[in-house]
Image: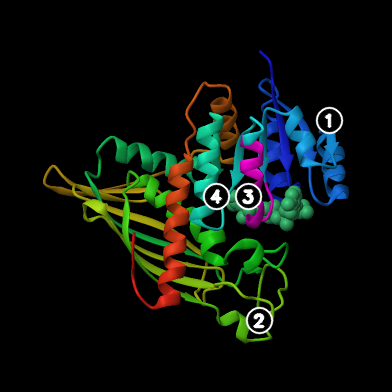
Amino acid sequence: MTKLRMGIIGSGGIAQSRHIPSYQQLTEQVELFGVYDVDYERAKEASVLFNITNVYEQVSDMLKDVDAVTICTPNKFHADLAVQALEAGVHVLCEKPMAMSVEECDRMIEAEKESGKVLSIAYHYRFMKEPRAAHQVIQEGEIGDPMVARVQALRRRKVPGWGVFTNKQLQGGGSLIDYGCHFLDLSMWLMGNPKPVEVSGTTYNRLSKTPEQVNLWGAFDHETFDVDDHVTAYIKFDNNVSMLFETSWSANIAEDKESVSLSGSNGGLEVFPFQLNQAKYGMLLNSSSEWVPGDEDPGLPQAANFVNSCLGLEEPIVSSEEARTVSQVIEAIYESCATGKSVQL
Ligand SMILES: NC(=O)c1ccc[n+]([C@@H]2O[C@H](COP(=O)([O-])OP(=O)(O)OC[C@H]3O[C@@H](n4cnc5c(N)ncnc54)[C@H](O)[C@@H]3O)[C@@H](O)[C@H]2O)c1
């Protein structure tokens, strides 16, 4: 079988910690063919560290040589690079969020359609063990029709102090677009991708106002901190489905919390840790899960799904349209906070 020639665009943290090591495990299907980064030295360093065949000074040159790319740059560059790659006839896996605005997502989808190539987004929570189990349980009808989602993605004092995560111009926002996006994606996917119709949100930026901050993930400059650090939202979908949503990089809580809890017409479930709650056989049944080792790294199934999609063997688990809906909700939350009104979609 001819191998898929993979190019990496942006060879920083997530490229080195997740994507490249995952492709390295798929040696039968993938050749790590090239790497490009605006910082040439960083690309070179990655090529040596991971044995990537070619380092490029121009992304356009790499696009002539590869079949697929994985985009791991700051959010601002996702859309232009994805469109450029698709127009060059190259499949794209782009890091989350899909882009900084819905308009950018639409440009990416248009290029995807015109090229006939794969465009998928790295919402890796979908590839984790508990979410996969939850998805299957819901698909098999165990909770009936999903009605209400309660979602909390809260970190205690963990603002990413490295990279450009607190720079609105390069990232488009803070805790919501960087961290909360995973949980919007995951919960909407579990609920069967309902269509959002109304969004009301509140965002906070209190960290910018205090010079001395306790932060467990490195230092950041409070004066240039211009993104949200805490966000709440209420999202209404068609079919009377609704979501209560909260995310933060820096909540004043006892410990970090990642909770996705769904109530359906016949039962409910918690995703982390997995628990199914039903009223059945005249009883209230609560089934919990026991940890089974293996298959913990979501990077590998995510990479395998992208590669198999490029080879025409599978459909992408994360479609571009679904990722666009996540961006649509994020944009509406920011707009709702700016205008003080709910946003009709
Ligand atoms: N899935 C996840 O959980 C997860 C985790 C971390 C980061 N991310 C996403 O990955 C992306 C990158 O984050 P990171 O933590 O790796 O950041 P990083 O700062 O460690 O690396 C980004 C790299 O991109 C390079 N770069 C910047 N502009 C470029 C351009 N125009 N073309 C090519 N290279 C360019 C930088 O030089 C740097 O090496 C972001 O979109 C972020 O949201 C996702």
Q: Is residue 128 magenta?
A: no
Q: Residue at x 72, y 62 (%)?
A: 163
Contact (Cβ within 8 Å) of mark 2 with mark 3: no
Work out whether residue 230 or residue 330 is closer to the camera in this orientation and state it. 330
Contact (Cβ within 8 Å) of mark 1 with mark 3: no
Q: Is residue 81 magenta?
A: yes
The amino acid type, in three-letter code, at marker 3 is: His
Number of the label disc, if any, that sits on residue 303: none
Residue 131 visible in the snapshot: yes
Query: Which SS class for mark 1?
Result: loop
Q: CA distance from mark 4 to mark 3?
A: 7 Å
Q: From the image, which quarter does the N terminus lie in? A: top right
Q: Is mark 3 within 8 Å of ligand 1?
A: yes
Please tell me how crowded label 1 is: few (under 14), some (14-19), or many (20+) other residues with Cα within 10 Å.
Answer: few
Contact (Cβ within 8 Å) of mark 4 with mark 3: yes
Residue 273 visible in the snapshot: no
Q: From the image, which quarter does the C terminus lie in? A: bottom left
Work out whether residue 107 or residue 257 is closer to the camera in this orientation and state it. 107
Number of the label disc, if any, that sits on residue 53: 1
Direction from residue 199 to residue 54 in the image, left or right? right
The image quarter in which residue 307 lies: top right
Number of the label disc, if any, that sits on residue 78: 3
Q: Which residue is mark 2?
A: 213
Number of the label disc, if any, that sits on residue 98: 4
Direction from residue 14 to residue 186 in the image, left or right? left
Magenta region:
72-86
